[in-house]
Amino acid sequence: AQSVSQHNHHVILSEAASLELGCNYSYGGTVNLFWYVQYPGQHLQLLLKYFSGDPLVKGIKGFEAEFIKSKFSFNLRKPSVQWSDTAEYFCAVYMTTDSWGKFQFGAGTQVVVTP
Amino acid sequence: GAVVSQHPSWVICKSGTSVKIECRSLDFQATTMFWYRQFPKQSLMLMATSNEGSKATYEQGVEKDKFLINHASLTLSTLTVTSAHPEDSSFYICSASGLAGGHGELFFGEGSRLTVL
């Protein structure tokens, strides 16, 4: 069965530290990849997405992610986090064939940035 | 960017009553809409996929008769929680994928928090 796994459920780090969140999926077909962020009390927002082309994708707020097809991974990175990056981060994979498509989300990673 | 609106954002109802939640795509035609449920501190769980003009496809374990989904137009999908019980209390979120969003991109509604007393 297809699945999306995020390696860490909780991450706590200090301001200015670097952040990397892991995301792996299990599906051998065509995928589109996304990272969403959910700030406290707000709805999901798209951080970045990968459809095709350069596997290193830059998103909003200084985030980037790299698609490594051979590893079925799409890890999210930010070189220097801020307190305002405290949020929950979800990796999502859109798995598609000629006849159907399906989104699947990871369980989420709660990130807390301390001053 | 594309906007998806949900209504109501909060609803409290008595056990045994039915509640309808609307999901509208405001500035694009949504051929496909998805309904999710989110429990506290957990990820989104896909409940069903709704294609305009056809029956919804439900995920395993989701009761079709309990969670009625109607996608009658390209801009509106509704989720009706029938005979709601306290265990149905949750955060329900819709998302839409359509022409404005490009292939495979989702736009999310703000969510609807249901509390069943």
Image: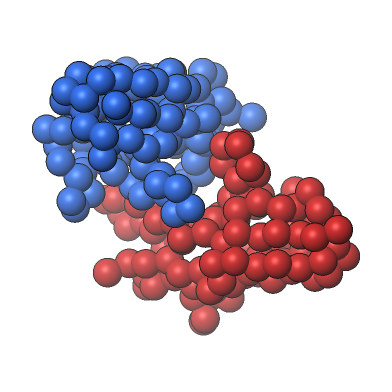
Q: Nearer the viewer, residue B102 or B5?
A: B5
**Residue at image location 66% in from the left, 51% down from the top:** A87
Asked which quadrant contains residue A66, the reply is bottom right
Q: Identify the image quadrant of the C terminus of chain B.
A: top left
- x, y percentage for residue A47? 66, 49
Q: Position of residue B53 (x, y in %)?
A: 23, 24
Seen as rendered, the residue at the extreme front is B117
Q: Residue at x 14, y 37 (%)?
A: B64
The number of numbered badges drawn on the structure is 0
Question: Does the rendering let one see residue A80?
Answer: no
Placement of A74 over or under B59, stated as above or below: below
Res B51 → quadrant: top left
Which colour style is shown?
by chain
Residue at image location 31% in from the left, 54% down from the top: A98
Q: Quadrant of the N terminus of chain B?
A: top right
- In this orientation, which residue lies closer to the viewer: A109 or B103? A109
Relative placement, left or right, of B39 versus B18 is right
Tell whether A78 sits left or right of B63.
Answer: right
Residue pictured at 43% horizontal, 30% vertical: B113
The residue lying furthest to the left in this view is B65
Q: Does residue B15 appear anywhere in the picture? A: yes
Q: Which chain is blue?
A: B
Q: Is residue B94 above or below residue A61?
A: above
Q: Left or right: where does residue B86 sit relative to residue A47? A: left
Colour red belongs to chain:
A
Which quarter of the picture shows residue B15?
top left
Above or below, comparing residue B78 to residue B62 in the picture: above
Q: Depth check: A113 or A32 in front?
A: A113
Residue B21, horizontal then vertical, whole percent: 34, 22
